[in-house]
Amino acid sequence: MIVERKISTTSWLACRRFICHTDVMTKINWGILSTAKIGLAKVIPALQRGTGGTVAAIASRDEARARDAAAKLGIPRVHGSYEALLADPEIDAVYVPLPNHLHVPWSIKALEAGKHVLCEKPLGLTAREGQELVDAAQRHPKLKVMEAFMYRHHPQWQKARQLVTGGGIGALRAVQSTFSYWNVDPKNIRNMADI
């Protein structure tokens, strides 16, 4: 889901050009808000393999965890709080892989700090939370907010869209889709409503 402005991943990753008001694209300096497994195992390595950005800093409430992650992944700067990362003037955009109930509040704080936001799914837990983030994004029209939901840009779905729009499979009559997982582990952070 893209909040407010519809742009492609390529355009979003190239937003640094817009920020600098120049025709020369420079790399986006990413800050990572937490040492969550999905960030450490999947997103940070993917960002590091890309050419449009660099992972410039990582933050954790536990500075030692941030230092350990930074050392393992070659991240140059460490912050012992999320607030400190948002205050870092070298950071252009943040990736938010925090527990689900923290996605909206920290995405809004990132916008208020002048950062673009790539928020892990779900963007919000309720329609009201989603609207809060949309409203915050509208107050910061030069900043982009995007949910890290990979299907939109996956080659198989781009091909499916091409087949539908090109008439390759006939008239579209219906689309049905499900995205889910089974997780009953009480120790999994996604199942801890009281945190």
Image (tube, rainbow, N blue to C red):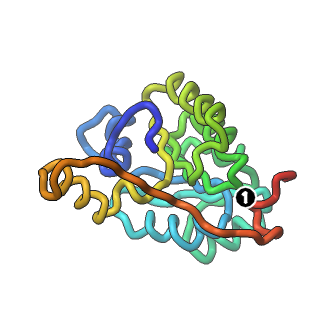
Q: 66 above or below 194? A: below
Considering every residue shown, the one lying at the far top of the view is 139
Considering every residue shown, the one lying at the far bottom of the view is 72
Direction from residue 112 to residue 183 in the image, left or right: right
- Front residue of this view, candidates 127 and 34: 127
Q: Where is residue 2 in the image (x, y as percent from the top left)?
A: 44, 41
Direction from residue 177 to residue 52 in the image, left or right: left
Quadrant position of residue 70? bottom right
Q: Position of residue 160 (x, y in %)?
A: 25, 59
Q: How many marks?
A: 1
Amino acid type at image mark 1: Ser
Direction from residue 7 to residue 38 in the image, left or right: right
The local crowd at label 1, few if under 14, some if 14 to 19, many if 20 or more residues have their Cα within 10 Å, is many
Q: Residue at x 23, y 61 (%)?
A: 159
Look at the numbered disc 1 and give the secondary structure of its residue: loop
Residue underneath mark 1: 60
- Front residue of this view, candidates 57 and 43: 43
- Front residue of this view, candidates 163 and 137: 163
Q: Position of residue 56 (x, y in %)?
A: 53, 58
Q: Which residue is drawn at 73% across and 60% down?
A: 190
Q: Residue at x 34, y 35 (%)?
A: 18
- Front residue of this view, candidates 29 and 179: 179
Q: Which residue is drawn at 71% across and 43% down?
A: 83
Q: Where is residue 116 in the image (x, y as percent from the top left)?
A: 50, 41
